[in-house]
Image (cartoon, rainbow, N blue to C red):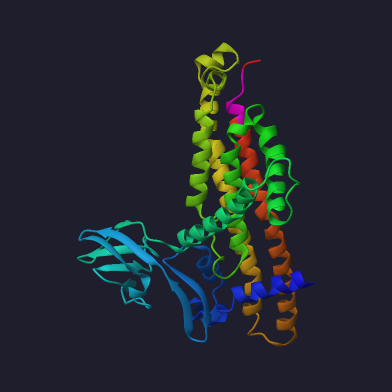
Amino acid sequence: MKYVKLIVCMMMLSFMGMPAMAASEEGGKLNTSEIVVEHIKDSYAWHVTTIGDRAIVIDLPVIVRSSTGWHIFSTARFAEESDVKGYRMGPDNLAIATQGDNAGKIVELQNGVEVRPFDISITKTVAVMMINVVVLLCCILIPARWYRRHKASDPAPGGFTGFIELIIDYVEENIIKPGIGNGYEKYSPYLLTCFFFILTNNLMGIIPFPPGGGNVTGNITITFFLALCTFIVTQVSGTKHYWKDIFWPDVPLPLKVFPLIPLIEFVSIFTKPFALMIRLFANMMAGHAIALSLTCIIFVVAAIGGATFLGMSAISVVMSIFMMCLELLVCFIQAMVFTMLSSIFIGLARAKAE
């Protein structure tokens, strides 16, 4: 029962500021799609909640190179409201566009023309990922410290160290080793890093308040980089038999001369990491969107009042608790699926002729 109460509290904290989002209302109705997108997308400031008319925001550093050189300052220097042209003006002719092709991005205004500067700002996703990396390092270095202080003949560790060892042993013995086969030890560090990085970001993303609340693995840039790493490791590990099966497979000669099968095999080199990228991105983003949408039901029917409001609110809370529990399961599943498919792709690339 205490876990259910904890989930309810976390869910309510996540949406404390939702009724105060006047900018998301159109014609007196709550714009749920805008609220969902606002919580999922990346931003230059970290919105925590809204109390009354006051928004609690963590300002993040802006680092851009415009036509006048490098600029480093806080997002607090941008105007809170956009002007008539749709710009939240900042220093040095820099602004955050609120409409158009560059909506939500920093632009430089040169004679009224938008120009995108070289932007390496610390956005919300980057800030959350940095925090998650620190959490991940602590989760790994604490058990590592225990092993440095003990011998192999000592009793097995318990508590947190034992729990981490259990997860590592399970992933290595049931996912990495079956997928790669002999010589899997060389790839264990990379694949375990992928697993724990994805798992940490997924779990921290469920926490609705800082230091959690970021949609890291629901950002396609992050999943693209992870898939790219797997792609590079897979191709570098490819054997002669692997490349032969791609460009000169064991099929009838006409299919080799007319390169239909080699073309399909070559395209599959890129479709495999593409599937990794899209699967992780879509599942995590969809999970966050559904959880947010279910909670929005409370505020959508708030104006109705009476039994309808109470009934729909109860249904919304129950469904939101269910989705939060389901997301916990999805966090582990998605980390396992990415690691499993990566190990299978690497194992296929290392296959030798029989």
Residue 297 vertical position relative to residue 345 in the rendered view, above or below: below
Q: How many marks?
A: 0
In percent of width and height, residue 134 lies at: 53, 57
In percent of width and height, residue 274 lies at: 53, 41
In the rendered structure, does residue 349 fall within the stretch colored magenta? yes
Q: Nearer the viewer, residue 215 or 289?
A: 215
Q: Is residue 198 visible?
A: no
Image-based side of 34 in relation to 69, left or right: right
Q: Is residue 89 visible?
A: yes
Which segment is the magenta one? 347-352
Q: Nearer the viewer, residue 193 or 322?
A: 193
Q: Residue at x 54, y 45 (%)?
A: 277
Residue 245 vertical position relative to residue 270 in the rendered view, above or below: above
Q: Residue at x 73, y 40 (%)?
A: 153
Residue 269 vertical position relative to residue 34 in the rendered view, above or below: above
Q: Residue at x 51, y 25 (%)?
A: 263
Q: Quadrant of residue 345?
A: top right
Q: Residue at x 50, y 40 (%)?
A: 229
Q: Quadrant where the C terminus lies?
A: top right
